[in-house]
Amino acid sequence: MEPAARGFTLVELLVVVAIVGTLVGLLVPAIQAARESARRTQCENNLHQIGIALALHANAHGAFPVGCIGGRQSQDKRCISWNVQILPFIEQTELGSSFDLNLASYHPNNKLSREAEIVLFLCPSTDSTDHYSSKDAWKGATFTDYGGIYGVEGTGRDAKEGETDSIQTLTEESLGVMLNEEVVTPKQITDGLSKTACVAEAALRRVPAMMEWVNGLNIFAQEQSTPINGSGLDNEIGSPHPGGALVAFCDAHVAFVAESADQDALDAMLTKAGGDQ
């Protein structure tokens, strides 16, 4: 007689199911971590390319691009971003040529240009599928997840009316590289190019009338007591990457700045001539 075929007992089946469940439980976080690592690497590469473009602009024109051409503080309301000015340096020469710098970034004649999606300006880890602004003057324009660093704001850092002819809203030692109406030359960055940030990931991203890539209002100042990924006065440095955010410096290198970074050190890297490096 042939022996009867033996199947799995219920206990054995439950053990197998438990083992498979445990393996899946171990594998899924590992896969998610690997995917996020790849996305963060792509984000870092984006910022590196942006940093190179800013350095090339400074080499070609003797200065970094204006943070915002025609912003809130001036009679000129064109609100043209630094992003527009670096288009020739990120292999977007044709798009740059089609954008009319004499008109506002939200002018109908610049509609086709601002609706172009530039992958380099988008972080792949952003938890949003909204690529197009949905309202206000920039409706239909595509977003950026990176903002220009205007400086550091907070108590004691506001420019006092009458003490300066500058159009800036912060004291000179509180200003960064991406300013309203004014270019910054490499020589003006006395804290050092490798120690001064120029562009960073924005905590508030895909926000209409703020974070369109053509919109010069996408520059922001970090509140002086707010850490990375903290909640400050307005837009701050932040990201969906666990533990910190990526920052591009004036020499084009990129660093991941941790949420636990010393606040004084963070504030120091965001000003161009604070004398605090």
Image: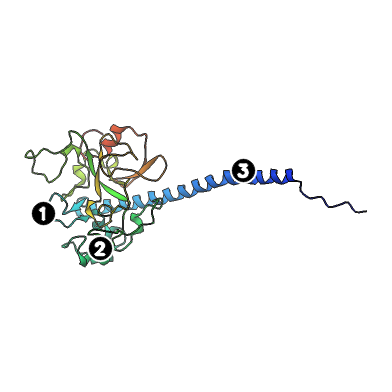
Q: Nearer the viewer, residue 67 or 185?
A: 67
Front disc: 3 or 1: 3
Q: Which element is circle 1 on? A: loop
Tell me which residue sits at (52%, 45%) in the image: 29
Q: Which mark is residue 22?
A: 3
* Residue type of the residue flagged with mark 2: Gly
| Picture quadrant of residue 250 | top left
Q: Which mark is residue 188?
A: none
Q: Nearer the viewer, residue 269 or 230?
A: 230
Residue 38 image offset from top left, x and y in percent: 46, 50
In the depicted structure, whether residue 30 falls above or below residue 116: above
Q: Which mark is residue 75?
A: 1
Q: Distance between the Cα atoms at labels 1 and 2?
A: 24 Å
> Where does label 2 land, which residue?
96
Tell me which residue sits at (22%, 42%) in the image: 176
For label 1, the crowd category at 10 Å Cα-Cα, with few meaning under 14, some 14 to 19 and many 20 or more, is few
For label 3, the crowd category at 10 Å Cα-Cα, with few meaning under 14, some 14 to 19 and many 20 or more, is few
